[in-house]
Amino acid sequence: MGQIKVEKNVGGIQGLCVITPAVHGDNRGYFMETYSQRDLAEAGLDIPFVQDNQSMSTKGVLRGLHFQKQYPQTKLVRAIKGRVFDVAVDLRAGSATYGKWYGVLLTEENKKQFLIPKGFAHGFLVLSDTAEFCYKCDDFYHANDEGGLAWNDPAIGIEWPELMGTYNGTASAEGYALSDGTALNLSDKDRKWPCLTEAFRF
């Protein structure tokens, strides 16, 4: 594991890992390995990733909380530009931490990566003017298999940084904004996900 540092079971939740790569820099810039199957396998994380995804989002966009039901995915996520607060929620029915969440700030400066196993809902909030977000998956996207969880369910209690507002009983963005006044921006789909009591369990 010469090129990465792996913090396992972050937040006391089995399987969640924060990975920090070794960055080699000088006055010309920097170099790092963003993915090494060998280093991950040496850390006990032998995962056959099959697909890479990338998105761009503007400040105040919240994407999530998402998962695939019949074809769950392990994801290795990172921000390559800007800042995002990335969150995973445990939806594994037999887990001692079912319904618990953990969040990590992913930025182009800290270059951290967040490994989210199968059985979790996942989402992120953009805190910079723009953010580019990329992630590896160990299964392909399957249309019509997506599920979701309300990002603001008080039973889960995610503490989204810089976000202000009052829960009104739905996943709507109405009444929510970042501390600088930027309105929360959700897709129509993400405004309608159910709370934990009605959520899919793995």
Image: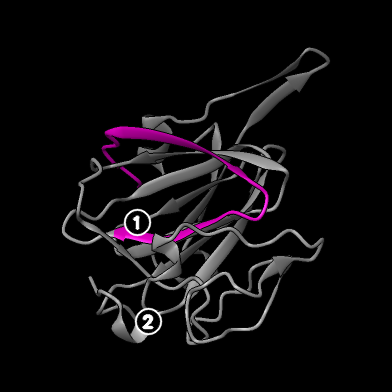
Q: Residue furthest top?
A: 28
The residue lying at 73 percent from left, 43 percent from top is: 129
In the image, 146 versus 86, the foreground residue is 146
Which labelled disc corresponds to residue 196?
2
Query: Range of the magenta residues?
Result: 44-67
Residue 176: x and y in percent read 66, 71
Residue 35 left/right relative to 2: left
Residue drawn 35% across the image and 46% down it: 45
Q: Is residue 51 magenta?
A: yes
From the image, state whether disc 2 or disc 1 is nearer to you.
Answer: 2
Report if the CB atoms under discs 2 and 1 are less than 8 Å apart: no
Disc on res. 192: none
Magenta-span inclusion, residue 182: no
The 10 Å Cα crowd at callout 1, few under 14, some 14 to 19, many 20 or more, is: many
Q: Is label 1 in a helix, a strand or a loop?
A: loop
Numbered circle sitting on residue 117? 1
Question: Which kind of residue does numbered mark 2 sit on?
Answer: Leu
Picture coordinates of residue 73, whole percent (x, y):
28, 51
Query: Split into 4 quadrants, where in the image is the C terminus?
Result: bottom left
Q: Nearer the viewer, residue 11 or 57?
A: 57
At x 37%, y 60%, the residue is 66
